[in-house]
Image (cartoon, helix red, strand yellow):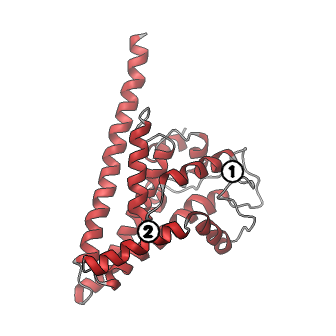
Amino acid sequence: MTARVAAPARATGRQAAVGLALASAIAGTWLALHIYSVFFHPLNGAGLAVAPLLVLAITWLNVGMFIVAHDCMHGSLAPGRPGLNRNVGRVMLALYAGFSFDRLLPKHHDHHKHAGTDGDPDYSHSNRFWPWYLAFFREYFGWREFGVLAVLLWSYVLILGASPVSALLFWGVPAILSSLQLFYFGTYLPHRRDEFDFADRHRARSNEYGYIASLLSCYHFGYHHEHHRHPHLPWWKLPSARTR
């Protein structure tokens, strides 16, 4: 009996250790690049040529912070530790775009319970990318989020002395690009309707990308049917579910 109890405890402890290490690496790298790019990166000469690479890197890390927060919504970052999941999720979404973890949490669980129906906050009757994206954007980005980001932006510029161009380029642009990336790979492709029926009630499908392409596109979130079937799995374990 002791051995059967200890093994799951070791497994969940290992999952929490790996998840927290990856979350720290993503958030720490994002914070370092964010501070450097907004406050110190020159927008002339070689610095101007490097700027697109910085934007792409920050965009990808933004996606990662959202995916970590998403794992926190399912309790899969640190299994059995709801307070830790909640607090990490709050930090990740606040850094990402001033979102409220507590407001997004019930909406995300509604998405899982009512995927692809009118009860799903991510669902759209339009199957076209841009109308669906705009509806998705309005669902999650409201006056509260706009106000938080506006206050932070002007604090950067007026109090901390950041260049408005740098703040918009290295903060605003990656936030918008990452929302498009998350929507395209994590909602539009998995949940859009086509000539083939969905496999089951989850009304989700997965992409066929290899490991590297899957990681770069959306931290394996494109293995979306697997996520809906196994929501307790963190993002970094989804490839193993895909191969089973």
| Inter-mark Cα distance, 2 to 1 | 30 Å
- In the image: residue 61, left or right of residue 233: left
Q: Amino acid at mark 1?
A: Ala
Q: Amino acid at mark 2?
A: Val
Label 2 packing within 10 angstroms: few (<14), some (14-19), many (20+): some
Taking 117 as reference, is 15 above or below it?
above
On the image, which quarter does residue 28 sit in? bottom left
- Residue 235: image x %, image y %? 46, 47
At x 78%, y 60%, the residue is 195
Residue at the disc numbered 2: 148
Residue at the disc numbered 1: 115
Which quadrant, please, contains the N terminus?
A: top left
Which quadrant, please, contains the C terminus?
A: top right
Q: Furthest-bottom residue in view? A: 45
Asked if one can make out residue 239 in the rendered structure from this viewpoint, the answer is no
Dots 2, 1 in contact, CB < 8 A:
no
Among numbered discs 2 and 1, the one appearing first in the sequence? 1
- In the image: residue 203, left or right of residue 12: right
Label 1 packing within 10 angstroms: few (<14), some (14-19), many (20+): many
Of residues 69 and 208, which is closer to you in this image?
Answer: 69
On the image, which quarter does residue 3 sit in? top left
Question: Total marks drawn?
Answer: 2
Q: Furthest-top residue in view? A: 1
Which of discs 2 and 1 lies nearer the camera? The answer is 2
On the image, which quarter does residue 201 sit in? top right
- Residue 66: image x %, image y %? 45, 57
- Residue 55: image x %, image y %? 37, 74
Q: What kind of element bears circle 2?
A: helix
Q: What kind of element bears circle 1?
A: loop
At x 54%, y 49%, the residue is 105
